[in-house]
Image (cartoon, rainbow, N blue to C red):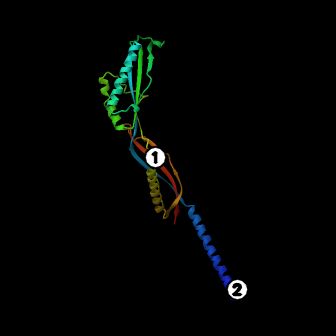
Amino acid sequence: MNDKIIPSLLITVGLLCLGLCIRSGFVSFSNRDRVVSVRGLAEREVKANKVTWPIVSKIVGNDMNQVYNDIQNSNKIIIDYLKKNGIKDAEISINAPQIVDAQANIYASEKIRFRYNVTQIIVVVSNDVDNVRKLISNQSELLKQGIAISADDYENHVTYEFTDLNSIKPEMIAQATQAARQAGEKFAKDSDSNLGKIKSATQGQFSIEDRDSNTPYIKNVRVVSYIEFYLED
C-alpha cells in the first residue's frame, strides 16, 4: 500500500510544481508584453573650438602690374597684422586672387572707371577662438593701413565649429537615458505599475547648432534617446 502512496504523492507534488511554474511563466510572459516607450533629451551649451575667418579685401585699378603690386602689399600688411597678434603661419592660407576685367564684358555700356577689380581672400583657421574673435573686432586696424576689408561678403563669412563631440558623448547619452527613465517611472507610477528593465533602446543623432544668430561661437548640442521599458506589477 505504502509503495503505491509514495509514488502517487511524488507525482502529485510534481504536477503541482509544474502547474505553478507554468502559471508563473504565463504571468511573466504577460508582463513581458507590457512596455512603455519614452524618450530622453539631453542638451548642453559648449563653446566652439575652431574658427574659420576669411579676410576678404578688394583692390581696383587700371594697370595690371600696379594691381599685382597692390595685392602683394595688401597681403603683407594683413599677414603682418595676424602674426603680430598671435596667429601662426600654419593657420594662414592665401587663396588665388579673383580678377575681373571689366573691358572683357561685352555687355558693359557705361564708361568704366577701373578696368580691373580684384578680390583677395586670406583665410585664418585656428583653434584659438577667443583670440580670433578679438582680431575680428579690431580689424579696423587694417582699414587704417589702407586695406579695404569686405565685411558683408555672404559667400565668405566667419564660421565656428565644435569638433570635440566625442568628449561629451558618453555623459550626454547617460543624461538622456536617465531622463527617459524618469519619464518611464512617472508613467509607471500613474498606471500603478513598476518600471522594469530596458527592452530596447535607440540613440538619436547628435545635433550641433548655433545657440542663436548673435552668438554663433556658442553651440547647442542635443541628443534624444528612445527607450522601451518593461512594466511590472
Residue 211 in sight in this render: no
Residue receiving disc 2: 4
x, y percent for residue 203: 51, 50
Quarter that holds the N terminus = bottom right
Q: Secondary structure at mark 2?
A: helix
Residue 127 in sight in this render: yes
Q: Amino acid at mark 1?
A: Asn
Q: Is residue 146 left or right of residue 111?
A: left
Q: Is residue 78 left or right of residue 1?
A: left
In whole angstroms, how far apart are the C-alphas of marks 2 and 1? 72 Å
x, y percent for residue 205: 50, 45
Residue receiving disc 1: 166
Q: Residue at x 45, y 48 (%)?
A: 169
Q: Secondary structure at mark 1?
A: helix
Residue 136 position by quadrant: top left
- Tell which residue pokes out farthest to the bottom in this image: 1
x, y percent for residue 15: 65, 76
Residue density around tag 2, few if under 14, some if 14–19, many if 20 or more, within 10 Å: few
2 vs 1, front mark = 1
Q: Residue at x 44, y 25 (%)?
A: 95
On screen, 128 above or below 28? above
Q: Residue at x 70, y 85 (%)?
A: 4
**Which one is nearer the viewer's eye here, 132 or 31?**
132
Q: Amino acid at mark 2?
A: Lys
